[in-house]
Amino acid sequence: MPAQRLSVVVTRRLPEPVETRMKELFDVELRDPDTRMTREELANAMRRADVLVPCVTDPIDAALIGQAGDKLKLIANYGAGVDHIDVATARQRGILVSNTPGVVTEDTADMTLALIMAVTRRIPEGLAVMQAGAWQGWAPTAFMGGRLGGKRLGILGMGRIGQAVARRARAFGMQVHYNNRKRLRPELEAELDATFWESLDQMVSRMDILSINCPHTPSTYHLMNARRLKLMKPTAVIVNTSRGEVIDENALTRGLRAGELGGAGLDVFEHGHEVNPRLRELPNVVLLPHMGSATLEGRIEMGEKVIINIKTFADGHRPPDQVVPGQL
């Protein structure tokens, strides 16, 4: 008699190839329509599933984990970041947590460079004029932005994505600088031609462009606070494709409105999808709806990692991408 299939609840719609493969392997409940689960729906899902497959839009805190039944054994997150999951409480309850690291590295780095170019070359301003039919023809001083070659790029967080951003920046002729919890190995630092700054304050005060590529943890919350933002050059640009909570969004908005910063490109926001309306009014700010990892290839690879984590767990082994509190 074949072993009973694991019951899996998926909280959002996933790419069709991923959902099809899940149906072949597991007793899976897919989400239709593609809306965020309410807290009550999440609690119910955690009571009836062996495995929950959530994503960044599902806050799974200690209280919610406390409502889970004894059946739930694995939270197989669809995404690399797990700051929306109380991993320590899950572990105490005997619930494993896995994620999908490494998949979004290249896609997110591409989007980081896209935002840098969009802000520094004023691409959205030009696009808006063209779409409005208001272009009067070329003029010597119209839409003048800045040249990327020779600019100093400061990378805050030199993990996989930060390093991928550094490689792209070098191709554009930018000078790469970085701040990280640990300095890179000398050979990797030489390969990236990157300069390490032990002091974040000193680095941000000298950069033309600052790219946020660190995770959200208690130690990085509002790492770019009002004081640090004021250290930046008035012409400097800040770009964030990591986690919105790393920047004090109100302080950033005030600085941009006061002309204390040259511009910003944001793919993530401090309060999820609730974007500060004052940011939308500024011509030197480019806002995107968390598109950093939004490629078909990347999203399918994320799904494949989720499936491997669940399948490995079902076979009685440790999921290859298990997250433990000590890693965070």
Image (cartoon, rainbow, N blue to C red):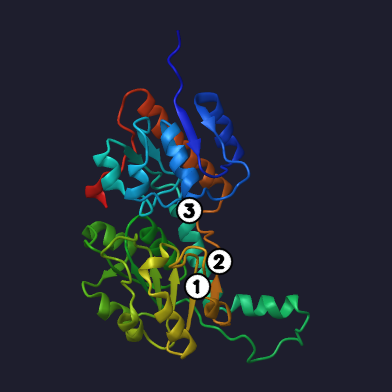
Q: Which mark is residue 18?
A: none
Q: Earlier in the sequence, mark 2 or mark 3?
A: 3
Amino acid at circle 2: Leu
Q: Nearer the viewer, mark 2 or mark 3?
A: 3
| Separation (CA) of disc 2 from disc 3 | 16 Å
Q: Where, quadrant-wise, is the N terminus in this rendering?
A: top left
Question: Residue under circle 3?
Answer: 57
Residue 158 lies, in percent from the top left, at: 32, 61
Amino acid at circle 1: Gly
Pointer 1 with pointer 2, Cβ within 8 A? yes
Residue 83 lies, in percent from the top left, at: 35, 54
| Separation (CA) of disc 1 from disc 2 | 8 Å
Amino acid at circle 3: Thr
Horizontally, is 178 left or right of 146 in the view?
A: left
What residue is shown at x 46% (from left), y 81% (from top)?
253
Circle 2 SS class: loop
| Separation (CA) of disc 1 from disc 3 | 21 Å
Question: Residue under circle 2?
Answer: 288
Q: Earlier in the sequence, mark 1 or mark 3?
A: 3
Question: Residue under circle 1?
Answer: 265
Q: Earlier in the sequence, mark 1 or mark 2?
A: 1
Quadrant for residue 234, please give it.
bottom left
| Residue 34 in view here | yes
Q: Is residue 284 or residue 313 the one in the foreground? A: 313
The image shows residue 245, relative to residue 16, as above or below, that is below
